[in-house]
Amino acid sequence: MQHPVESDPAATRARVSRLSQEQAADRLAWLVPELNRHNRLYHRESAPEIDDRTYDLMYRELELLEARYPALVREDSPTLRVGGDPVGHLAPFPHRTPMLSLGNAFSADELREFDGRIRRQLGEAAPESIPFAVEGKLDGAAVELVYEDGVLTGAGTRGDGAVGEDILHNVKTIRAIPRRLHGDPLPSRISVRGEVFFPLEPFEAMNDAREARGEKRFENPRNACAGTLRKKDPSFAAASPLTFYAHSFGEVEGLELPGSHLAQLVQLSEWGLPVNSDLNTRHPDIEETILRVAELGALRNDLPYEIDGAVVKVDDTALQAVLGFLTRTPRWAIAFKYPPPQVHTVLRGVEFQVGRTGKVTPRAILAPARVGGVTVSSATLHNADHLTRLDLRYGDTVAIERAGDVIPKVDRVIVDADHAGRPAVTYPDTCPACGTHLERPEGEVDIRCPNSLSCPAQLHAGLRHFVSRGAMDIDGLGTKLITQLLDAGLVRRPSDLYRLDVPTLCTLERVGQRSAQSLVDAIARSRDRGLGHALAALGIPEVGEATARDLSLWFGTLDAIMEASPEALAEVHGIGDKVAARVRRFFDDPVFRAEVERLRQAGVAFPDVPEERRTPRGASEDPDAEAATSPIAGRTFVLTGTLPTLARSEAKKRILAAGGKVTGSVSKRTHYLVAGDAAGSKLDKAKKLEIPIIDEAALLEMLGSIQPD
Ligand code: IVH
């Protein structure tokens, strides 16, 4: 996939300003579903694929595109919604006043623009300078608390902004949140909003304790927080070091609050609610505000909790009321987002880890350093190319970065006088787990251990994948038990799981009759997960749950997938040449074919997908009148390199809609090669075969007005 959006918001802005309406529509056709997908992953599945900053930047691009071409605002645009959907297993918690989110600013100039917008809107009523409150943007879960006559009677998550989930049972376990407010007079009803979060140190301690008990560490404080709050059983929240700061209001009845936001927060703290008064400040105008935002940015590495930005709010609540709201954000507040924090530390060593597909990933072992409030002692180095690009040497000082919830990474080497004389970090020749000679398949960045099913590291990771939720979903088969099964020689490949019986399992340490029986039952149940899950379970490199499902729905049967050519595979929406080649190579490998056969023998079903559920083949096989007359109908295209505006999947979709075909490799039958930036071997081949080479603009012209449905 093309990189979604530049990391520099100014570059995005410049690109968007050059897009024609049609190009903007194409970009939106990719961007909107992509943002919706990430929203769903974040809010519904608690399994984000991208870090917050990337999301924010993509969202920013969406706003820019929609501001430039308001006619293009799609009905499914996330700008028309307030948040994620409520999940549904807890009671609904309606918000009397919608719980909004905040617009983002990434630079001082954008804060000045924010001030300018406010002034324009206030017009004559605008004061000489507008005082702002600056607060830390806490990275936890937004929660609404309702107090009636001073008693905590309700608590809900944000949900979709209009309706959240009732989490009072969990909120009552948070010691920082008072069950009763103190003071006289008190409002007859008040809804207070704030952030429930994990302070960093208790979070680390809790994780260490989990690990010591053999449980999985939580990846990051925010997801752990949201997950804990949404549990039905309050004992999880009670055992967690969650805390709370109030930062805003829904509505207040039966009492006038002061006319300044910060004074209102002080009032809350007098009633007993925790407020982040150490950090909250007030500034006479936007320039002073900008200075404070920068200061807070420098401070944040030393805070006992994580902030990913600063929130700037018009302090005067009368002005707030005049300014009002947009669909999902107030006009009087904005979040300034900080770039991910970086620190320098020393590289002590490099470990090479073998994953489920044999991919060998280098991991930097670092002198422990605090970054973004967390102590980091290792970081990912991605792959061999990244190592080469970094020119990393043992003993080098490196800049490491930690973006919210993602794994820390080594960003660059701080080159000093001794750098050149230090020993370079290179890949080992043999697999650290099994000693087999490592390989780097042509044209790939990854280095692999080819000993697929016999390498203990791959086998362990492969089994973990096989039993995981998106694959066979076998409950009760954790990492420890997998290790025991492998060590005892009871399992050498996934298909062996189906031969396990209760007496055999009972020979393992700490496995009793009952747990053995429930494991055998869980394994038996996994035989019928459907084609998509069974395919995902095979562990084909690059083929996760979603791709496996796409393949299943497109081809309909396992045999069709196993026999498909790379070109046929690449016709599936979202599957590129690389993935197609991987799938082909996997099924060409006799070791894996044999394992598929063994799984079938063991009763694992790879059921055909009924015709009516399969993906319709669209215009390429059923050209409508318009498509048939297009210069594209019946022509075969190959896409290569990065196109300036279209994601490759989007270009492909539009060519298909126009009655053309898209294949993965250049041959004599190719009609056009569409080449973008960094086009490689396909371009050379097309030149050799004298195939016409066109750029994106020419493609767009050929496509004319034809849009996919
Ligand atoms: S004010 C109408 N202040 O950021 C304005 N929000 O995108 C409501 N957040 O999940 C929010 N720290 O819970 C505000 N000091 C702060 C905040 C803050 C964190 C969260 C908020 C929401 C998100 C807004």
Image (cartoon, rainbow, N blue to C red):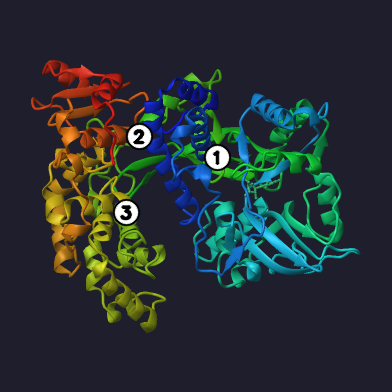
Which amino acid type corresponds to the residue marked 2 in the rendered image? Tyr
Q: In front here: 664 or 524?
A: 664
For marks 2 and 3 on the same chain, the one whose residue lies earlier in the sequence: 2
Q: Which mark is residue 427?
A: 2
| Vertical relation: 110 (above or below) 467 | above
Determine contact: label 3, label 1, CB under 8 Å: no
Q: Nearer the viewer, mark 2 or mark 3?
A: 3
Which residue position is annotated with label 3?
545
Q: Residue at x 57, y 73 (%)?
A: 233
Up/down of 280 relative to 203, above or below: above
Q: Secondary structure at mark 2?
A: loop
User: Label 1 is placed on what type of residue?
Assistant: Ala
Quick one: label 2, few (<14), some, or many (20+) residues within 10 Å? some
- Mark 1 nearby-residue class (10 Å; few <14, some 14–19, many ≥20): many
- Point out the tag, 3 or 1, that comes first from the N-terminus: 1
Among the two numbered marks 2 and 1 on one chain, the one whose residue lies closer to the N terminus: 1
Select label 2 or label 1 by which is in front.
1
Instruction: For the N terminus, give its image quadrant.
Output: top left
Q: Position of residue 97 (x, y in %)?
A: 67, 55
